[in-house]
Amino acid sequence: MTMLSSSTLAVANPWALVPSLGNLDAYISAANRMPMLTLEQEQEFARKLKNENDLEAAGKLVLSHLRLVVSISRQYLGYGLPHGDLIQEGNIGLMKAVKRFDPDQGVRLVSYAMHWIKAEIHEYILKNWRMVKVATTKAQRKLFFNLRSMKQGFKADADASDSDMHRSTLNPQEVDAVAKQLKVKPEEVLEMEMRMSGGDVMLDPTPNEEGEEAFGPIAYLSDTNHEPTVMMAAHQRDVLASDGIAAALEVLDERSRRVVEERWLKVQDDGSGGMTLHELAAEYGVSAERIRQIEVAAMKKMKAALAEYA
């Protein structure tokens, strides 16, 4: 076992020893070269963190266990998520473990940290593996993280016997075996298998080879008629067209109101409107231009009244 050298212990910023995750190969190589702590060193640093909140000691505990995160993260590469992201989430779990580690419990940090690293990676996978979450209960999570490996075991047995070697779904006997081993209902096994086997569909259109935006399902899945802002705007228009117009007409004198009603609000059975400017002019004994001026002034008053009503 390689011990932590005195030169490493003296580094003021221990994180400077590890490159960025942007260069994944260099990071993994550096993490695997980090010296391991002896039991005495681990307890010394853990007590400094616990009793004195020594952050440098915490950094050394974390650095010496980065290789553990790299090793655990490799177990989850089958979910199609970036290895660097899995390592980063695992590092968060490692730091949580270091913060809560009690050196007086008689357990090595490596054993204690494994739970926290896996828990953090599990959360990341569940949040990002599918747009719609595939596992929300404890039983579903157990299924999610065990069903894939168990299916691979069944497939290996089938390949060995050259029977059903191209089958991708579980048969009834395998479903019962999974349900019994994981202590869940067979129906839950079938539902999780269906969820995990379903492919993701991009709702938003993506550019094609010519750089033009392609057609996406979101174009026909969206219902703009029931979009909240559209419904609110439609409701406001309905209110203005009924109560708002009635309130606006109340601010006009009798002649102005009659002109507006005849010119804009009346509809005959044949689809035509009300009286013309000349017909109204003849009724009131004024010129058509005068009726037009009354109409313009009345519309301005109504517009101001509608603005206040809205």
Image: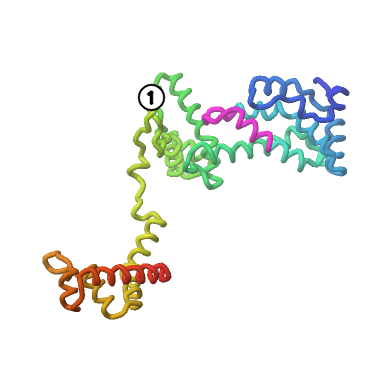
> Residue 126, percent across and down?
54, 40
Going by the image, does 20 lie left or right of 45? left
Quadrant into which the C terminus falls: bottom left
The overriding secondary structure of the stretch rendered in magenta is: helix
The spot of residue 105 in percent (x, y) is 81, 41
62 displayed left or right of 84: right
User: Which segment did they paint magenta?
Assistant: 75-92
Instruction: Give the residue at the far left of this rendering.
Output: 270
Q: Is residue 149 visible?
A: no
Measuring 86% from the left and 30% from the top, which residue is drawn there?
Answer: 41
The quarter holding residue 174 reads: top left
Residue 122: quadrant of the picture = top right
Residue 277 higher or lower than 171, as above or below: below
Instruction: Report how many numbered discs are placed on residues in the image.
Output: 1
Residue located 84% across and 27% down the image: 11
Residue marked by disc 1? 209
115 left or right, relative to 218: right
Measured as percent of width and height from the top left, residue 118 is found at 64, 36
Residue 30 visible from this viewpoint: yes
Where does residue 137 sit, x and y in percent of width and height?
A: 53, 47
Q: Residue at x 47, y 45 (%)?
A: 185
Question: Which amino acid, by three-letter code, is at mark 1?
Answer: Glu
Residue at image coords 38%, 56%: 230
Q: Secondary structure at mark 1?
A: loop
Determine if the magenta segment contains residue 61: no
Screen quadrant of the N terminus: top right
For the residue pair 31 and 14, the one nearer the viewer reads as 14
